[in-house]
Image (cartoon, rainbow, N blue to C red):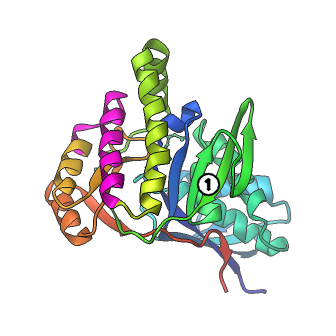
């Protein structure tokens, strides 16, 4: 029997713009150097990691094969370095890497098609999603999502009446410290809570717009390697996210601990628990402070490589 083909895809870290992106504001994300690999080859029955494809933890893999494969059963194996439930894009990476492996079995990788299909799968499995995670896992590197097309467009993705324009943006090789609270919170209700506030209060709506400005200013600051300015923008973003109701006391604790050794720190992803990110040139010290405050830590770097075939 032929050997397996394999594809890998990176996790992601949202640097600026979570929640505001749901209202059409820009968001900035980077792929990170924690990756998921998916191995696939034809087999006499469906197996994933030697088990049934129906297990809940393989729901993204199952949705991917259902949409993108019609040629008979496969043997699949998943190897992931990305912690699950930490807001680091593990579901997007496994979805994108699965689609990558399936495409490699058929012919060759088509990243824009993978980005669109992976977004549809996340949408199907999660109910609602923006395409940031899946596009970062597909494209690698820095990804800026905006409502309009501008220079360095990667692809556009549409769903119902919504449209996202995903752009390539170059980020310097920084170390980011992630602090995970260990508290998992579903994204859907957090997004719904922000919408309620925005609908009820012009002040909340103006906070969302301010996050949009912070995202664009933060991108410029990071590209200039002005870490002081980028850190201050992260701190302000954190204040606004808290005011929009997506903070958590444990996130505040980890953010405060990290800031002693950082330019700035904020929650990353949906909030309500989940993870925070610190920008620092003393990653070990910041990580120790986060651990002492009760968090789990990961040191990550931007990963310029998106979905790819493994040799
Ligand atoms: O939980 P994550 O890391 O996938 O981030 C959610 C980001 C939100 O802006 C809150 C929602 C979205 O779909 O963009």
Q: Residues within 10 Å of mark 1 (few under 14, many from 20)?
A: many
Q: Residue at x 77, y 74 (%)?
A: 104
Q: Residue at x 36, y 44 (%)?
A: 184
Q: Residue at x 55, y 65 (%)?
A: 170
Which residue is outermost to the top? 200
**SS label for mark 1:** helix
Q: Nearer the viewer, residue 258 or 87?
A: 258
- The quarter of the image holding the C terminus is bottom right
Q: Nearer the viewer, residue 143 or 191?
A: 143
- Based on the displayed image, in which of its 4 quarters is residue 41 positioned? bottom right
- Based on the displayed image, in which of its 4 quarters is residue 115 positioned? bottom right
- At which x and y percent is residue 86? 40, 54
Position of 134 relative to 248 (above/below): below
The secondary structure that dominates the magenta segment is helix
- The quarter of the image holding the N terminus is bottom right
- At which x and y percent is residue 235? 29, 45
Q: Residue at x 74, y 64 (%)?
A: 111
Position of 156 relative to 24 (above/below): below
Q: In the rendered structure, does residue 234 fall within the stretch colored magenta? A: yes
Q: Nearer the viewer, residue 105 or 286?
A: 286
Which range is magenta? 227-250
Q: In the rendered structure, does residue 165 fall within the stretch colored magenta? A: no
Q: Is residue 175 visible?
A: yes
Say which residue label 1 marks: 134
- At which x and y percent is residue 101? 71, 71
Position of 189 relative to 264 (above/below): above
């Amino acid at each position: 029997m032929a050997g397996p083909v394999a594809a890998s895809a990176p996790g992601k870290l949202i640097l600026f713009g979570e929640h505001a992106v749901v209202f059409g504001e820009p968001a900035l994300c980077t792929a990170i150097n924690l990756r998921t690999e998916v191995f696939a080859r034809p087999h006499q029955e469906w197996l994933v990691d030697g088990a049934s494809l129906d297990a809940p933890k393989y729901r993204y893999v199952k949705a991917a094969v259902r949409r993108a494969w019609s040629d008979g059963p496969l043997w699949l194996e998943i190897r992931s370095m990305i912690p699950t439930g930490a807001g680091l894009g593990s579901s997007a990476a496994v979805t994108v890497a699965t689609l990558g492996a399936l495409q490699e079995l058929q012919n060759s990788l088509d990243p824009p098609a993978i980005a669109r299909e992976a977004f549809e799968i996340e949408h199907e499995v999660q109910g609602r999603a923006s395409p940031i995670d899946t596009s970062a896992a597909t494209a690698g590197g820095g990804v800026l999502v905006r409502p309009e097309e501008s220079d360095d467009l990667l692809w556009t993705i549409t769903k119902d009446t919504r449209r996202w324009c995903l752009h390539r943006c170059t980020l310097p090789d920084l170390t980011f410290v992630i602090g995970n609270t260990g508290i998992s919170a579903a994204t859907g209700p957090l997004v719904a809570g922000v919408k309620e506030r925005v609908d009820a209060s012009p002040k909340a709506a103006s906070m969302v717009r301010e996050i949009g400005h912070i995202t664009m200013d933060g991108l410029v600051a990071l590209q200039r390697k002005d870490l002081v300015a980028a850190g201050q923008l992260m701190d302000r973003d954190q204040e606004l996210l808290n005011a929009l109701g997506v903070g958590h006391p444990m996130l505040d604790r980890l953010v405060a601990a990290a800031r002693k050794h950082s330019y700035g720190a904020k929650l990353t992803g949906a909030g309500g628990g989940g993870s925070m990110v610190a920008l620092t040139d003393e990653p070990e010290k910041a990580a120790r402070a986060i651990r002492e405050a009760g968090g789990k830590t990961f040191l990550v770097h931007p990963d310029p490589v998106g979905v790819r075939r493994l040799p």
